[in-house]
Structures are given as C-alpha cells and as structure tokens.
Amino acid sequence: MNPTIELLKARRSAPPAALNGPGPNAAEVEALLQIGARVPDHGKLAPWRFIVFEGEARARAGSIIAEVYAGLHPEADPARIETERLRLSHAPLVIAVVSRAAPHGKIPEWEQILSAGAVCMNVTVAAKALGFASAWLTEWYAYDAAVRARLGLEAHEKIAGFIHIGRCDAPREDRVRPVLADIVSRY
C-alpha cells in the first residue's frame, strides 16, 4: 500500500505524560511549522499563527497556567497546582496553533477556523512522519481569557490546539474507531 496511506492509518495520539525526548531539532521544528502552514486557506489570509514552547518556555507557560488556576480555585491543593504547572512540560516541544479568524468581506469565519484545525492536523501528521508521537489537546487553559492574554494572544484570537510532540516508546492501543456504516450516507 502507499506509504502515505500507511502513515495516516498508523497515526495515533500519545498522552503528553508519555512523551519524552529528544524532541525535534531546529530543522525538524522548522519543517513542522512549514508543513503546518501548507493547508487550505481561502483568500490566503493565514488566519492562524504559531507559538512554540521549548526548553524553559514550557515551564514559564506552565507557571502562568498554574497561577491562573490557583486564582480560579483557591481551594486547590498543592498537588493539583503542580499538575497545572506541568501541563506543557512533559513533551519536549509544544506548538500552540492560534486561530486568528475574524470577520471578512469574502471569506467566512467558519472557513478560517477550519483552516486552523487543518494546521493542527498537518502538524500531527508531519510529527508522525518525522518519527515522533504527538497529542493535539486544548484543555481548560486554552479557553481561559487570562491565560490566553498572558501567553500573548489578542482578544479575538483562540487556541485551536496545543500540539505536544516527543518520543513515545510505550505501546499505544488504538481507540475504537467509528463504524463507517454508522457515519456514511450516500446522496
């Protein structure tokens, strides 16, 4: 069978806590971003952008997440705050895909949002092709205005996903996939 089809059939998410290093090198990160940006983009708007978290940047972002969580949940115990602090620290690389979708005279906002989702999928497939495992997640902090602002997002921007990328040696069982007969109709 075609190697691209085999790659797509084998792609599987890995929990961020199971991801370790070494992560992608600088050339591989550049390739992931270039491939991420090669998506359908009606009007050539690039209605998305990237935030790359590597090294200490992951811990700095985790501190923001933990501080905001602690403010929202003053009853939280230290172990939970530490869990929040480590959100972006498991995988050696985390790429946030930021949707910049906005009203436009010709391009529906929905198409711009879908384009950001396509970016996330391209990055996860490219990571697999480079020999890495990944997980595309959002979690509560992707939707929190204070976290988004402190990570440098503008008010209208949204997180389409945090793509956690690293190596995963642990076996991963495939999840149950939909039965095509249940989700396909023919017109």
Image: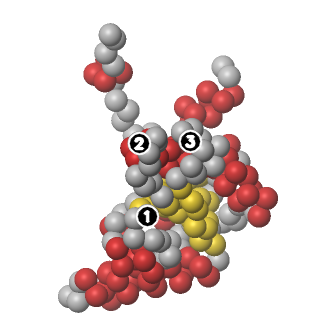
Which of 52 and 39 lies nearest the eye of the viewer? 39
Placement of the C terminus among the 4 image quadrants: top left
Q: Which residue is mark 1?
A: 157
**Mark sitting earlier along the chain (3/2):** 3
Q: Secondary structure at mark 1?
A: loop
Q: Which residue is mark 2?
A: 108
Which of 107 and 148 lies nearest the eye of the viewer? 107
Residue 176 appears in the rendering:
yes
Task: Give the quarter of the image for residue 154.
Answer: bottom left
Q: Which residue is mark 3?
A: 43
Q: Residue furthest right?
A: 27
Q: Position of residue 170 (x, y in %)?
A: 55, 54
The residue under the point 43% across, 55% down is 102
**Mark sitting earlier along the chain (1/2):** 2
Q: Is residue 50 left or right of residue 138?
A: right
Question: Tags 3 and 2 in contact by the CB under 8 Å rule?
Answer: no
Q: Position of residue 92 (x, y in %)?
A: 62, 68
Q: Amino acid at mark 1?
A: Glu
Question: Tags 1 and 2 in contact by the CB under 8 Å rule?
Answer: no
Residue 15 appears in the rendering:
no
Q: Amino acid at mark 3?
A: Gly
Q: Secondary structure at mark 3?
A: loop
Q: Nearer the viewer, mark 1 or mark 3?
A: 3
Placement of the N terminus among the 4 image quadrants: top right
In the picture shown, does residue 45 fall above or below 16?
A: above
Q: CA distance from mark 1 to mark 3?
A: 19 Å
Q: Within 10 angstroms of label 3, few (less than 14), some, or many (20 or more) residues?
A: few
